[in-house]
Image (cartoon, rainbow, N blue to C red):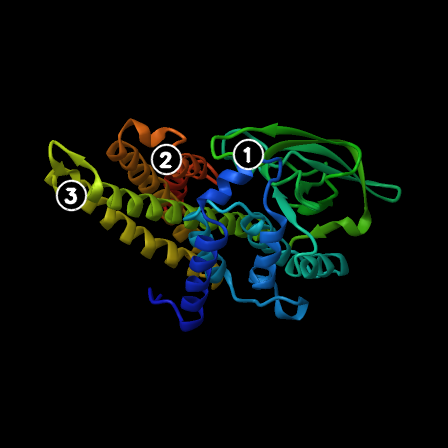
Amino acid sequence: MSLVLTEEQSILQQSAAEFYSSVMPVTAFRQLRESEAVFDAETWSQMVELGWSSIMVPEELGGLEFGLMGMGILAIEGARTLAKSPLTTSAAVSVAALNFCKPSEQRDALLSALAAGEKMAAFAHLETTQFKPAIIRTQSASAADGYNVNGSKSCVENAQSSDVILMTARSPNAGFSESDGFILLIDPKADGIEFNSVGLIDEREYADISISDFNIAKDEKLEWNDDAAVAQVLDTATVIAACELYGCSLEAFERTLEYVKDREQFGNKIGSFQALQHRLAHQYTQLELLKTVVYDALSAVEKNRKDAALAVSHAKALANDTARLVTTEAIQMHGGIGITDELDIGLFYKRARVLRTMWGDSVYHRSRFASLSGY
Protein backbone atom coordinates (compact mmCIF):
# COMPACT_ATOMS: atom_id res chain seq x y z
CA MET A 1 0.00 0.00 0.00
CA SER A 2 1.04 3.62 -0.42
CA LEU A 3 2.26 5.26 2.79
CA VAL A 4 1.18 8.67 1.47
CA LEU A 5 -2.23 9.77 2.68
CA THR A 6 -4.79 10.81 0.09
CA GLU A 7 -5.78 14.47 -0.11
CA GLU A 8 -8.99 13.77 1.82
CA GLN A 9 -7.13 11.82 4.51
CA SER A 10 -4.53 14.58 4.86
CA ILE A 11 -7.27 17.17 5.32
CA LEU A 12 -8.89 14.97 7.98
CA GLN A 13 -5.55 14.56 9.77
CA GLN A 14 -4.90 18.33 9.80
CA SER A 15 -8.44 19.05 10.96
CA ALA A 16 -8.20 16.45 13.73
CA ALA A 17 -4.81 17.73 14.93
CA GLU A 18 -6.14 21.28 15.14
CA PHE A 19 -9.36 20.23 16.87
CA TYR A 20 -7.69 18.05 19.50
CA SER A 21 -4.96 20.58 20.29
CA SER A 22 -7.39 23.49 20.65
CA VAL A 23 -10.57 21.88 21.99
CA MET A 24 -9.34 18.71 23.72
CA PRO A 25 -5.78 19.34 24.99
CA VAL A 26 -4.32 17.41 27.91
CA THR A 27 -5.67 20.08 30.25
CA ALA A 28 -9.18 19.02 29.19
CA PHE A 29 -8.34 15.44 30.16
CA ARG A 30 -7.19 16.64 33.56
CA GLN A 31 -10.40 18.61 34.07
CA LEU A 32 -12.56 15.62 33.15
CA ARG A 33 -10.55 13.45 35.49
CA GLU A 34 -11.50 15.68 38.40
CA SER A 35 -15.20 15.65 37.50
CA GLU A 36 -17.74 12.84 37.53
CA ALA A 37 -18.24 13.05 33.76
CA VAL A 38 -16.76 10.31 31.58
CA PHE A 39 -16.47 12.75 28.67
CA ASP A 40 -17.64 16.24 27.77
CA ALA A 41 -21.04 16.13 26.04
CA GLU A 42 -20.56 19.49 24.31
CA THR A 43 -17.22 18.44 22.87
CA TRP A 44 -18.70 15.17 21.66
CA SER A 45 -21.47 17.15 19.92
CA GLN A 46 -18.80 19.12 18.07
CA MET A 47 -17.15 15.87 16.97
CA VAL A 48 -20.52 14.62 15.72
CA GLU A 49 -21.01 17.85 13.76
CA LEU A 50 -17.62 17.27 12.13
CA GLY A 51 -18.95 13.89 10.96
CA TRP A 52 -16.53 11.81 12.98
CA SER A 53 -19.26 9.63 14.52
CA SER A 54 -20.32 8.56 11.02
CA ILE A 55 -16.87 7.86 9.55
CA MET A 56 -17.45 4.08 9.34
CA VAL A 57 -21.23 4.02 8.85
CA PRO A 58 -22.55 3.17 5.35
CA GLU A 59 -23.81 6.10 3.30
CA GLU A 60 -27.30 4.64 2.91
CA LEU A 61 -27.68 4.77 6.69
CA GLY A 62 -26.58 8.37 7.04
CA GLY A 63 -22.84 7.78 7.32
CA LEU A 64 -19.79 9.10 5.49
CA GLU A 65 -18.34 5.62 4.82
CA PHE A 66 -14.87 7.16 4.94
CA GLY A 67 -13.34 3.88 6.04
CA LEU A 68 -11.17 2.46 8.78
CA MET A 69 -8.15 4.46 7.64
CA GLY A 70 -10.04 7.65 8.46
CA MET A 71 -10.94 6.38 11.91
CA GLY A 72 -7.34 5.31 12.46
CA ILE A 73 -6.16 8.84 11.70
CA LEU A 74 -8.61 10.22 14.29
CA ALA A 75 -7.47 7.65 16.85
CA ILE A 76 -3.81 8.58 16.37
CA GLU A 77 -4.45 12.32 16.72
CA GLY A 78 -6.81 11.84 19.68
CA ALA A 79 -4.23 9.78 21.53
CA ARG A 80 -1.75 12.66 21.25
CA THR A 81 -3.89 14.73 23.62
CA LEU A 82 -5.31 11.83 25.69
CA ALA A 83 -8.77 12.82 24.40
CA LYS A 84 -11.65 11.15 26.25
CA SER A 85 -14.71 10.55 24.06
CA PRO A 86 -16.92 7.70 22.78
CA LEU A 87 -15.15 7.85 19.40
CA THR A 88 -13.14 4.62 19.50
CA THR A 89 -15.58 2.58 21.59
CA SER A 90 -18.80 3.67 19.86
CA ALA A 91 -18.02 5.11 16.42
CA ALA A 92 -15.21 2.65 15.68
CA VAL A 93 -15.49 -0.74 17.42
CA SER A 94 -19.26 -0.80 17.98
CA VAL A 95 -20.01 0.41 14.46
CA ALA A 96 -17.63 -2.22 13.09
CA ALA A 97 -19.49 -4.90 15.07
CA LEU A 98 -22.83 -3.78 13.62
CA ASN A 99 -21.36 -3.61 10.10
CA PHE A 100 -20.40 -7.27 10.40
CA CYS A 101 -23.98 -8.23 11.38
CA LYS A 102 -26.70 -9.20 8.93
CA PRO A 103 -28.91 -6.25 7.94
CA SER A 104 -32.08 -5.87 9.97
CA GLU A 105 -34.42 -3.04 10.92
CA GLN A 106 -32.97 -2.89 14.44
CA ARG A 107 -29.34 -2.96 13.26
CA ASP A 108 -29.88 -0.28 10.61
CA ALA A 109 -31.75 1.99 13.03
CA LEU A 110 -28.96 1.70 15.59
CA LEU A 111 -26.25 2.41 13.00
CA SER A 112 -28.12 5.53 11.89
CA ALA A 113 -28.48 6.65 15.52
CA LEU A 114 -24.76 6.14 16.15
CA ALA A 115 -23.89 8.06 12.99
CA ALA A 116 -26.06 10.98 14.09
CA GLY A 117 -24.63 10.95 17.60
CA GLU A 118 -28.09 10.25 19.03
CA LYS A 119 -26.84 7.14 20.79
CA MET A 120 -23.55 5.69 22.02
CA ALA A 121 -22.62 2.02 22.16
CA ALA A 122 -20.06 -0.18 23.89
CA PHE A 123 -18.79 -3.54 22.63
CA ALA A 124 -18.63 -6.30 25.27
CA HIS A 125 -16.85 -9.50 24.30
CA LEU A 126 -13.98 -10.58 26.55
CA GLU A 127 -14.84 -12.75 29.55
CA THR A 128 -11.47 -13.69 31.04
CA THR A 129 -8.76 -11.70 32.78
CA GLN A 130 -6.24 -13.02 30.25
CA PHE A 131 -6.84 -12.22 26.59
CA LYS A 132 -8.68 -15.32 25.33
CA PRO A 133 -11.09 -13.97 22.71
CA ALA A 134 -12.32 -17.38 21.54
CA ILE A 135 -14.02 -18.12 24.86
CA ILE A 136 -17.70 -17.13 25.00
CA ARG A 137 -19.59 -18.39 28.04
CA THR A 138 -22.45 -15.89 27.89
CA GLN A 139 -25.58 -17.78 26.83
CA SER A 140 -28.87 -16.72 25.30
CA ALA A 141 -31.72 -19.23 25.44
CA SER A 142 -35.07 -18.89 23.71
CA ALA A 143 -37.90 -17.65 25.91
CA ALA A 144 -41.62 -17.15 25.39
CA ASP A 145 -41.35 -13.58 24.10
CA GLY A 146 -37.66 -13.35 23.23
CA TYR A 147 -34.44 -14.57 24.82
CA ASN A 148 -33.14 -15.17 28.33
CA VAL A 149 -29.51 -14.11 28.87
CA ASN A 150 -26.97 -15.22 31.48
CA GLY A 151 -23.27 -14.41 31.54
CA SER A 152 -20.54 -11.90 32.26
CA LYS A 153 -18.09 -9.67 30.43
CA SER A 154 -14.74 -8.34 31.60
CA CYS A 155 -13.41 -4.77 31.65
CA VAL A 156 -15.79 -3.17 29.14
CA GLU A 157 -14.89 0.42 28.32
CA ASN A 158 -17.65 3.06 28.56
CA ALA A 159 -20.27 0.42 29.34
CA GLN A 160 -22.12 2.43 31.98
CA SER A 161 -22.14 5.69 30.02
CA SER A 162 -23.41 4.10 26.79
CA ASP A 163 -27.01 3.85 25.59
CA VAL A 164 -26.64 0.27 24.41
CA ILE A 165 -24.16 -2.56 25.01
CA LEU A 166 -23.38 -4.88 22.11
CA MET A 167 -22.81 -8.15 23.92
CA THR A 168 -21.52 -11.28 22.20
CA ALA A 169 -23.23 -14.52 23.20
CA ARG A 170 -23.86 -18.08 22.04
CA SER A 171 -26.56 -20.72 22.18
CA PRO A 172 -26.65 -22.95 25.29
CA ASN A 173 -25.81 -26.04 23.21
CA ALA A 174 -22.68 -24.51 21.63
CA GLY A 175 -19.19 -25.05 23.00
CA PHE A 176 -17.29 -22.21 24.64
CA SER A 177 -15.17 -21.56 21.57
CA GLU A 178 -17.51 -22.81 18.84
CA SER A 179 -19.42 -20.76 16.29
CA ASP A 180 -23.20 -20.23 16.54
CA GLY A 181 -22.59 -16.81 18.03
CA PHE A 182 -24.51 -13.55 17.78
CA ILE A 183 -24.82 -10.06 19.29
CA LEU A 184 -27.37 -9.02 21.89
CA LEU A 185 -28.48 -5.40 22.30
CA ILE A 186 -28.47 -4.75 26.04
CA ASP A 187 -29.87 -1.67 27.76
CA PRO A 188 -27.33 -0.79 30.50
CA LYS A 189 -30.03 0.97 32.54
CA ALA A 190 -32.36 -2.04 32.68
CA ASP A 191 -32.88 -4.11 35.81
CA GLY A 192 -30.90 -7.34 36.05
CA ILE A 193 -27.53 -5.92 34.99
CA GLU A 194 -24.74 -5.56 37.53
CA PHE A 195 -21.72 -3.34 36.95
CA ASN A 196 -18.50 -3.58 38.91
CA SER A 197 -16.29 -0.59 38.15
CA VAL A 198 -12.66 -1.37 37.30
CA GLY A 199 -10.09 1.30 38.09
CA LEU A 200 -7.11 1.36 35.74
CA ILE A 201 -4.18 3.78 35.72
CA ASP A 202 -5.31 5.60 32.57
CA GLU A 203 -8.34 6.85 34.54
CA ARG A 204 -11.03 5.98 32.03
CA GLU A 205 -14.35 4.22 32.61
CA TYR A 206 -14.20 0.41 32.69
CA ALA A 207 -16.56 -2.10 34.25
CA ASP A 208 -17.11 -5.83 34.59
CA ILE A 209 -20.68 -6.78 33.63
CA SER A 210 -22.80 -9.59 35.07
CA ILE A 211 -26.22 -10.56 33.71
CA SER A 212 -28.54 -13.09 35.31
CA ASP A 213 -31.94 -14.18 33.92
CA PHE A 214 -32.14 -11.07 31.77
CA ASN A 215 -34.87 -11.03 29.11
CA ILE A 216 -34.60 -9.27 25.76
CA ALA A 217 -36.98 -9.03 22.81
CA LYS A 218 -36.49 -11.12 19.67
CA ASP A 219 -35.41 -8.15 17.55
CA GLU A 220 -32.63 -7.34 20.04
CA LYS A 221 -30.62 -10.30 18.82
CA LEU A 222 -28.43 -9.69 15.75
CA GLU A 223 -26.88 -12.44 13.64
CA TRP A 224 -23.29 -12.27 12.39
CA ASN A 225 -22.65 -12.20 8.64
CA ASP A 226 -20.47 -15.31 8.91
CA ASP A 227 -18.23 -17.27 11.28
CA ALA A 228 -15.31 -14.89 10.67
CA ALA A 229 -17.22 -11.80 11.81
CA VAL A 230 -16.11 -11.88 15.47
CA ALA A 231 -12.45 -12.15 14.47
CA GLN A 232 -12.88 -9.23 12.06
CA VAL A 233 -14.40 -7.05 14.78
CA LEU A 234 -11.56 -7.93 17.15
CA ASP A 235 -9.02 -7.11 14.44
CA THR A 236 -10.68 -3.71 14.02
CA ALA A 237 -10.53 -3.06 17.77
CA THR A 238 -6.92 -4.23 17.88
CA VAL A 239 -5.68 -2.04 15.06
CA ILE A 240 -7.45 1.00 16.57
CA ALA A 241 -5.60 0.29 19.83
CA ALA A 242 -2.35 0.10 17.83
CA CYS A 243 -3.18 3.52 16.36
CA GLU A 244 -3.68 4.96 19.82
CA LEU A 245 -0.39 3.47 20.97
CA TYR A 246 1.37 5.07 18.01
CA GLY A 247 -0.22 8.44 18.84
CA CYS A 248 0.76 8.19 22.51
CA SER A 249 4.31 7.16 21.63
CA LEU A 250 4.76 9.88 19.03
CA GLU A 251 3.59 12.59 21.43
CA ALA A 252 5.76 11.26 24.27
CA PHE A 253 8.79 11.21 21.94
CA GLU A 254 8.26 14.77 20.68
CA ARG A 255 7.71 16.12 24.19
CA THR A 256 10.87 14.37 25.38
CA LEU A 257 12.86 15.71 22.44
CA GLU A 258 11.85 19.27 23.31
CA TYR A 259 12.62 18.66 26.98
CA VAL A 260 16.21 17.48 26.42
CA LYS A 261 16.83 20.51 24.21
CA ASP A 262 15.99 22.82 27.12
CA ARG A 263 17.09 20.89 30.23
CA GLU A 264 20.56 21.77 31.51
CA GLN A 265 22.81 19.55 33.59
CA PHE A 266 26.50 20.01 34.40
CA GLY A 267 26.35 23.32 32.54
CA ASN A 268 25.19 21.78 29.24
CA LYS A 269 21.91 20.99 27.52
CA ILE A 270 21.34 17.29 28.11
CA GLY A 271 20.31 16.95 24.45
CA SER A 272 23.96 17.50 23.58
CA PHE A 273 24.95 14.24 25.32
CA GLN A 274 25.69 11.66 22.68
CA ALA A 275 24.27 8.79 24.75
CA LEU A 276 20.83 10.46 24.81
CA GLN A 277 21.06 11.31 21.12
CA HIS A 278 21.62 7.66 20.25
CA ARG A 279 18.66 6.57 22.37
CA LEU A 280 16.41 9.19 20.79
CA ALA A 281 17.56 8.22 17.30
CA HIS A 282 16.64 4.59 18.04
CA GLN A 283 13.18 5.67 19.20
CA TYR A 284 12.67 7.74 16.06
CA THR A 285 13.50 4.83 13.77
CA GLN A 286 11.09 2.56 15.69
CA LEU A 287 8.32 5.14 15.43
CA GLU A 288 8.83 5.47 11.66
CA LEU A 289 8.69 1.69 11.33
CA LEU A 290 5.56 1.54 13.48
CA LYS A 291 3.84 4.19 11.36
CA THR A 292 4.40 2.03 8.27
CA VAL A 293 3.12 -1.13 9.94
CA VAL A 294 0.04 0.55 11.45
CA TYR A 295 -0.99 2.14 8.15
CA ASP A 296 -0.54 -1.21 6.44
CA ALA A 297 -2.72 -2.96 9.06
CA LEU A 298 -5.46 -0.32 8.69
CA SER A 299 -5.43 -0.81 4.93
CA ALA A 300 -5.43 -4.60 5.27
CA VAL A 301 -8.51 -4.64 7.51
CA GLU A 302 -10.32 -1.97 5.48
CA LYS A 303 -9.78 -3.86 2.21
CA ASN A 304 -10.35 -7.29 3.84
CA ARG A 305 -7.01 -8.58 2.58
CA LYS A 306 -6.18 -12.22 3.08
CA ASP A 307 -3.25 -11.28 5.32
CA ALA A 308 -5.31 -8.84 7.44
CA ALA A 309 -5.06 -10.86 10.65
CA LEU A 310 -1.29 -11.22 10.16
CA ALA A 311 -0.90 -7.48 9.58
CA VAL A 312 -2.98 -6.64 12.67
CA SER A 313 -0.95 -8.86 15.00
CA HIS A 314 2.26 -7.43 13.53
CA ALA A 315 0.99 -3.90 14.19
CA LYS A 316 -0.19 -4.53 17.75
CA ALA A 317 2.95 -6.40 18.83
CA LEU A 318 5.19 -3.68 17.40
CA ALA A 319 2.99 -0.92 18.84
CA ASN A 320 3.17 -2.53 22.29
CA ASP A 321 6.94 -2.81 22.15
CA THR A 322 7.50 0.67 20.71
CA ALA A 323 5.19 2.28 23.27
CA ARG A 324 7.03 0.51 26.08
CA LEU A 325 10.38 1.71 24.74
CA VAL A 326 9.38 5.32 24.05
CA THR A 327 7.28 6.02 27.15
CA THR A 328 9.80 4.35 29.48
CA GLU A 329 12.65 6.31 27.94
CA ALA A 330 10.55 9.47 28.26
CA ILE A 331 10.21 8.90 31.99
CA GLN A 332 13.94 8.22 32.37
CA MET A 333 14.99 11.30 30.40
CA HIS A 334 12.63 13.53 32.36
CA GLY A 335 13.92 12.09 35.61
CA GLY A 336 11.88 11.12 38.66
CA ILE A 337 9.44 14.00 38.17
CA GLY A 338 8.35 12.42 34.88
CA ILE A 339 6.18 9.80 36.57
CA THR A 340 4.53 12.29 38.91
CA ASP A 341 1.21 13.93 38.16
CA GLU A 342 2.92 17.31 37.87
CA LEU A 343 4.11 16.60 34.33
CA ASP A 344 1.96 15.35 31.47
CA ILE A 345 4.53 12.82 30.30
CA GLY A 346 3.55 10.36 33.02
CA LEU A 347 -0.06 10.42 31.77
CA PHE A 348 1.07 9.15 28.36
CA TYR A 349 3.08 6.40 30.03
CA LYS A 350 0.00 5.28 32.00
CA ARG A 351 -2.32 5.36 28.99
CA ALA A 352 0.15 3.39 26.91
CA ARG A 353 0.53 0.87 29.73
CA VAL A 354 -3.19 0.08 29.58
CA LEU A 355 -3.37 0.07 25.78
CA ARG A 356 -0.51 -2.44 25.63
CA THR A 357 -2.70 -5.04 27.33
CA MET A 358 -5.97 -4.18 25.57
CA TRP A 359 -6.93 -6.59 22.77
CA GLY A 360 -3.82 -8.68 23.31
CA ASP A 361 -0.30 -8.10 24.58
CA SER A 362 2.91 -8.70 22.63
CA VAL A 363 3.18 -12.33 23.70
CA TYR A 364 -0.32 -13.08 22.43
CA HIS A 365 0.16 -11.37 19.09
CA ARG A 366 3.61 -12.83 18.46
CA SER A 367 2.12 -16.27 19.10
CA ARG A 368 -0.80 -15.49 16.79
CA PHE A 369 1.54 -14.14 14.12
CA ALA A 370 3.59 -17.34 14.31
CA SER A 371 0.50 -19.55 14.08
CA LEU A 372 -0.85 -17.63 11.10
CA SER A 373 2.57 -17.96 9.45
CA GLY A 374 2.47 -21.75 9.81
CA TYR A 375 4.80 -22.18 12.77
User: How far apart, in angstroms, are the residues tagged by discs 3 and 1?
Assistant: 37 Å
Q: How crowded is mark 1: few (under 14 residues within 10 Å), some or many (20 or more)?
A: few
Residue with the mark numbered 3? 277
Mark 2 and mark 1 residues within 8 Å of each other at the beta carbon: no
Query: Considering only vertical position in the picture, is 110 above or below 199?
Result: below
Instruction: Give 375 or 266, whichever is nearer the viewer.
Output: 266
Residue 348, position as x, y percentages in the image: 39, 39
Q: Residue at x 46, y 65 (%)?
A: 12
Instruction: Give 292 or 261, whichever is nearer the viewer.
Output: 261
Q: What residue type is labelled 3?
A: Gln
Residue furthest to the right: 144
Which badge, 2 or 1, is on the more N-terminal residue?
Answer: 1
Image quadrant assignment for residue 113: bottom right
Q: Which residue is drawn at 40% across and 51% down?
A: 310
Residue 6, position as x, y percentages in the image: 40, 71
Task: Examine the rendering and report whether any part of residue 140 can be seen.
Answer: yes
Q: Disc 1 on helix, strand or loop?
A: helix
Residue 188, position as x, y percentages in the image: 72, 39
User: How far apart, in angstroms, are the residues tagged by discs 2 and 1?
Assistant: 16 Å
Q: What residue type is labelled 2?
A: Leu
Instruction: Give 12 or 312, whichever is nearer the viewer.
Output: 12
Residue with the mark numbered 1? 34
Mark 3 and mark 2 residues within 8 Å of each other at the beta carbon: no
Query: Considering only vertical position in the picture, is 356 above or below 299?
Result: above
Checking the image for residue 343, the label placed there is: 2
**In screen coordinates, is 95 left or right of 276?**
right
Q: Which amino acid does label 1 sit on?
A: Glu
User: How far apart, in angstroms, are the residues tagged by discs 3 and 2?
Assistant: 22 Å
Image quadrant assignment for residue 150: top right
Q: Disc 3 on helix, strand or loop?
A: helix
Which badge, 3 or 1, is on the more N-terminal residue?
Answer: 1
